[in-house]
Amino acid sequence: MPVLLESRHDAADAEIRIGEVAGPIRHWGFLAHPDLPDRPGPAWLLVAIRPAPTLRHFDPEAVDYWVTTHGRGTRRTLTHATPMPLSDDFSWGLIRLVDRLGVSNEYLTFGGRLDALSLDDVVVAAFASPAPLLRRGGHSQGWDAGADAVGAFFGRVMVAVDFTPGFEAALASATPLTRYCAFVRDATARAAVGAAGGRRDDDLAPLLATEARRLVTNAPSDWAAAAELLAAATAPDQETGPAVSPRTHLWP
């Protein structure tokens, strides 16, 4: 499976990559691996879009995801009619799998690489990321540990995108692992504040502490870049003053 994460960008290589991993998806609508707390990553999500539903499992007909265009987030939709093959970077946020009835399964991502092609009239798409892909509930699955915290973090990020000049472009240019490091930095800081206030029911805190130690050792440049990214989220504009409303508490 690690072939999914190698840096190959041409159509021929994309076909080799997906062809090597398409077997597990043959009898399913989608498969994902791994999710926290099992492993921190790298992670992948395989999706099969068929010309007609099998009626034997969840049958995705579309996948909504985000890309970066000129420094801004743009939503894209992958369907059976999308020209193949396709290779592209996807951005942070929500990946939403939707069937013919509008029922969905959702994932939260920090970004990565998408490769897709048509195999025997089945569009097979592989979303690969060096950071976790977390289940956010839906028809066929529950929520992963930490998904609510990641969702809340993305909500705060959206406030910064709306109110902090230049932050959206800075966030878009960051690597997926830097974005993940920013989340871990922010979450561990919040956990420390909670612990100092007497909170003892934060089951995610030990996992975050372990992740922080791992990232400091294994991804020091992304860890350092994440500190700059968080600082940029609240950087004031020289002409307009504070980046966000004083009532908006973005970061501890």
Image (spheres, rainbow, N blue to C red):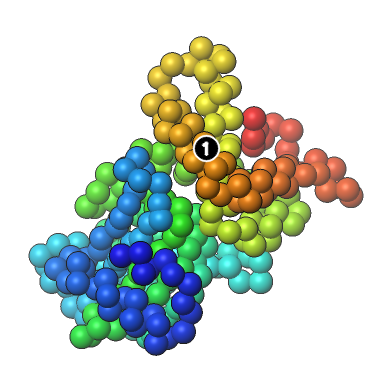
Q: Between 97 and 233, which is closer to the camera in this rendering?
A: 233
Q: How many marks?
A: 1
As drawn, is 229 to the left or to the right of 29? right
Residue 181: % across, % down: 56, 45
Residue 243, compared with residue 251, is above or below; it is: below
The amino acid type, in three-letter code, at marker 1 is Ala
Q: Which residue ends up furthest to the left in the rendered image? A: 56
Name the residue at 38% across, 56% down. 43
Quarter occupied by the C terminus: top right
Please tell me which residue is depicted at 43% across the width and 28% down the height of the picture.
Answer: 206
Q: Secondary structure at mark 1?
A: helix
Decide which of 136, 86 is in the foreground and name it: 86
Residue 222: x and y in percent read 60, 51
Does residue 162 sit above or below 114 in this rendering?
above
Which residue is at 46% across, 57% downward? 130
Q: Name the quadrant containing residue 4.
A: bottom left
Q: Quadrant of residue 14?
A: bottom left
**Mark 1, residues whose alpha carbon is within 10 Å: few (<14), some, or many (≥20)?**
some
Q: Which residue is mark 1?
A: 212
Left or right: residue 184 compared with residue 247: left
